[in-house]
Amino acid sequence: MPESVRATSVPAESPSLEGSTAQGAAQTPEEAGVVNRSVPQSAALPESAITATGLTKRYGDFTAVDGIDFAVSRGESFGLLGPNGAGKSTTMRMIAAVASRTAGDLTVAGLDPERQGPEVRARLGVIPQQDNLDEELTVRENIIMYGRYFGLPRRWLLAKAEELLDFAQLTHKAKARVEDLSGGMKRRLTIARALVNEPDVLLLDEPTTGLDPQARHVLWDRLFRLKENGTTLVLTTHHMDEAEQLCDRLIVVDHGRIMAEGSPSGLIREHSTREVLELRFGMDRNAELAEELGAVLDGGDSGFDRFEVLPDRLLVYAERAEEALEHIHAAGHRPVTSLVRRSSLEDVFLRLTGRTLVD
């Protein structure tokens, strides 16, 4: 974001929203006369967008975030993967300068969120887990009104709103009220609104929760475009496919602690086999057959590594899962269902914690 549009005060006059349309190209922030009041014009952005060392958050006797260390590079798409209650959202709230830390150090764009909260928030775009749009305003009005909170001039915002509506594929809904939008459209509008101040870092807390598969893929496409343009993305999710699609690097979090860190593909290579065979023999037979099947697969040529017994199925980890299934059939075992798939981050989390992401 250009330095000159940061952390300004909101002008006294209220914005005129009804029937607003952009008239020509947007002014540059300098032309709009927005003057930075908090960050020196010459301040250089640090290499790391976010750095956390020993970051800790306690609520009484409960430790939500337990001394974690991580760094997010500028332009990186970084993920926090874990089940509900793992500490992901609490970490995001500390980054967003809306929750204090109990211990440790944290910087965002070289600033301390506790001591320089307004300056940090001026550099961030925040997508909360639940949409917090103004249902009674139109789509365009939501973007413009939000921009006024940052002290951005009305004329600049009129053109910026049109740019963001186009980005979110909502131009045809510009005059519609938010309450009339689908869930996917509301989510895209929330993202568009968060980009109005041209943030250095975009925080996304469970960005596709509650969306159908088609809406999720449309949203992914919008986030890919931001990533290609150099926006730093930090997202929390418990959807393994989402993390694999969007993240350059991630941390796996459980009970407030980092269990592993790396790229999605690197973590899968390190903690799992190339393929997984899912077998169902019936609820009462999955566990009892594990040892017998292990004897069948040990020493074979399928690259068998281990079993995981879940309540509803048996997971066979092997480099060549089809060959493992052939060995099982040859030994006279006939599962009710079988499925061969590639390993995923779900398997990494299961290996590290002994439970699935949705537990």
Image: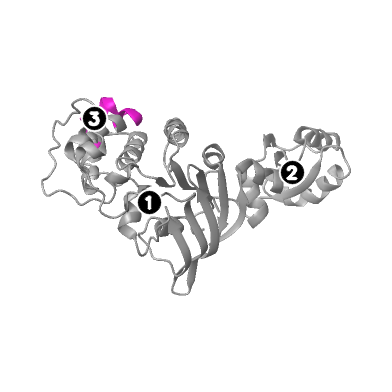
Compared with 226, 131 (above or below) is: below
Q: Around disc 1, counting alpha carbons within 10 Å, would you say few (fewer than 14), some (14 to 19), or many (20 or more)?
A: few
Name the secondary structure under disc 2.
Answer: strand
Specify the segment rendered in magenta: 165-178
CA separation in Å, label 2 and label 3:
50 Å
Q: Which residue is mark 1?
A: 43
The residue to which callout 3 is attached is: 174
x then y, percent, for residue 69: 55, 60
Task: Name the element at disc 3.
Answer: loop
On the question of residue 285 being in view, the answer is: no
Residue marked by disc 2: 317
Amino acid carrying mark 2 in the image: Tyr
Residue 325 as seen in the image, left or right of residue 158: right
Tag 3 or tag 2, which sits nearer the N-term? 3
Q: Earlier in the sequence, mark 3 or mark 1?
A: 1
Classify the position of the C terminus by image quarter. Answer: bottom right
Q: Quadrant of residue 142?
A: top left
Tag nearer the camera, 3 or 1 = 1
Write the residue at 76% across / 36% down.
321
